[in-house]
Amino acid sequence: MECSYITWFHIFLSEYHDSKEIKGKLAEKLFLSEYNMPDIFATMQHSFILNDGRLTILGNKLKQKSSLLLASLSDTIVENMESPAKILTADEEMVSILYTNRLIVYNHHKKKLVKTIDLSDWEPHQVLPDEDMLWLISKKGGLLYGLSIE
């Protein structure tokens, strides 16, 4: 019996803002493979890829707008592959990222760090932004915290 399937990776990579599949040299450049699943967030004009501490922003027709190591934004941001890394929100100007127990708010339009908030006291397990609040579930006792990020 023959089994045909489409890998989850193939489906995952084809769901970008402009429905273009990342493959070939661009996929290699971004270190995308079946074994290394990045965090991806798409808006109407950009795709944001967070992979091993590097944020890559793609525009229309998969044109790379920028690529930067998050640790290069500030001395307070250190690489730690064991800590959670997730794109929380993004729009056509700003992107908010949870990385190494920090909330990083980056203006990708101006290419400038807006703020970084240390969340290590709470050891976040899950994080959800909500306007000017950040809701997180702590690994310490599983408690829910609401933090003002204004």
Image (cartoon, grey):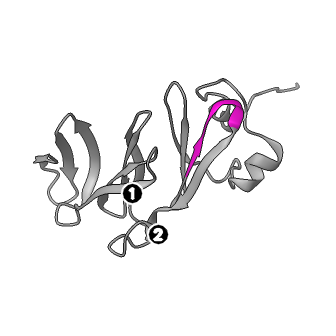
Compare residues 86 and 59 and report the one nearer the observer: 59
Residue 57 left/right relative to 111: right
On the image, the x and y values in percent for residue 89 come to 37, 38
Q: Amino acid at mark 1?
A: Pro
Residue placed furthest toward the right: 2
Where is 12 relative to 143, above or below?
Answer: above
Read off the residue under disc 2: 72
Where is 130 relative to 141, above or below?
Answer: above
Mark 2: which secondary structure? helix
Residue 28 left/right relative to 17: right
Read off the residue under disc 1: 84
Q: Quadrant of residue 68?
A: bottom right
Task: Specify whether residue 59 is painted magenta.
Answer: yes
On the image, the x and y values in percent for residue 63 come to 69, 39
At a point 88% along the width and 26% down the height, the residue shown is 2
Compare residues 28 and 45 and report the one nearer the observer: 45
Residue placed furthest toward the bottom: 75
Residue 85 left/right relative to 138: right
Residue 76 left/right relative to 37: left
**Pair 2/1: label in front:** 2
Where is 117 relative to 34, above or below?
Answer: below
Range of residues picked out in magenta: 56-62
Q: Which mark is residue 62?
A: none
User: How far apart, in angstroms, are the residues tagged by discs 2 and 1?
Assistant: 18 Å
Mark 1: which secondary structure? loop
Compare residues 138 and 114 and report the one nearer the observer: 114
Task: Specify whether residue 150 is painted magenta.
Answer: no
Dot 1: within a 10 Å radius of its alpha carbon, few (fewer than 14), some, or many (20 or more) residues? some
On the image, the x and y values in percent for residue 115 come to 27, 57
Residue placed furthest toward the front: 110
Q: Which comes sooner in the sequence, label 2 or label 1?
A: 2
At a point 18% along the width and 42% down the height, the residue shown is 135
